[in-house]
Image (cartoon, grey):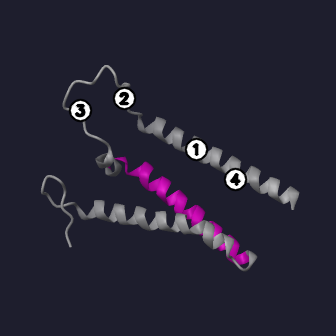
Amino acid sequence: MTAEMPNGQREPWSERLFDYALSVLGMIILLSPLALWISWSETVFYIILGTGLGAMAAVAALVTLFPEKRRRWLPSEPTSAPSPHLPQTPKALTPGQEFRQLMLVVALLLAVGIGLFVLLWAVL
């Protein structure tokens, strides 16, 4: 089964593999909360938690290490002059800025998660 691109060319196998990897990792991330909720022992809980966090780290690593693979989903350059009534598109970030933003989001999510865990631990 070959994937066709809009211009009629075949999609390289590496891009299909990248898409499949992100899809599988996304499903693992999606199912992790449910699996954590129904885990029957502490050991299973930590195994599932590690798997979910590992999948998140793998997605972050894939997207950071292979930025050219995700560029194909971004809109191409506009063919007409920009409208004065629409807001201007922001400037593209450099890879260093993207990585800093990604790490900021990860740090904030970790802080919120740890804060919720401590709050629940203190209450219960």
Q: Residues within 10 Å of mark 4 (few under 14, many from 20)?
A: few
Q: Is residue 11 found inside the magenta-colored segment of the image?
A: no
The disc at residue 89 is: 2
Which residue, given by chain and number where applicable, does mark 1 sit on?
A: 105
The residues bearing labels 4 and 1 have C-alpha atoms spaced at a distance of 12 Å
Q: Are marks 4 and 1 in contact (CB under 8 Å)?
A: no
- Looking at the picture, which amino acid does disc 2 mark? Thr
Going from N to C along the chain, the mark reached first, 3 or 4, is 3
- Looking at the picture, which amino acid does disc 1 mark? Val
Q: Residues within 10 Å of mark 2 (few under 14, many from 20)?
A: few
Q: Secondary structure at mark 1?
A: helix
The residues bearing labels 4 and 2 have C-alpha atoms spaced at a distance of 33 Å
The residues bearing labels 3 and 4 have C-alpha atoms spaced at a distance of 40 Å
Which residue, given by chain and number where applicable, does mark 4 sit on?
A: 113
Identified at 21% across, 60% down, the residue is: 11
> Horizontal and vertical percent for residue 25?
47, 65
Which region of the structure is painted magenta?
43-68
**Is the C terminus in the top left, top right, bottom left or bottom right quadrant?**
bottom right
**Hey, which residue is sitting farthest bottom in the picture?**
40
**Hey, which residue is sitting farthest top in the picture?**
84
Q: Secondary structure at mark 4?
A: helix
Q: Secondary structure at mark 3?
A: loop
> Horizontal and vertical percent for residue 84?
31, 19
Q: Is residue 62 found inside the magenta-colored segment of the image?
A: yes
Q: Are marks 1 and 2 in contact (CB under 8 Å)?
A: no
Q: Are marks 3 and 2 in contact (CB under 8 Å)?
A: no
Decide if residue 26 is on the left or right side of residue 37: left
Q: Secondary structure at mark 2?
A: loop
Mark in front: 3 vs 4: 3
Seen from the viewer's position, the closer of residues 6 and 14 is 6
Going from N to C along the chain, the mark reached first, 4 or 2, is 2
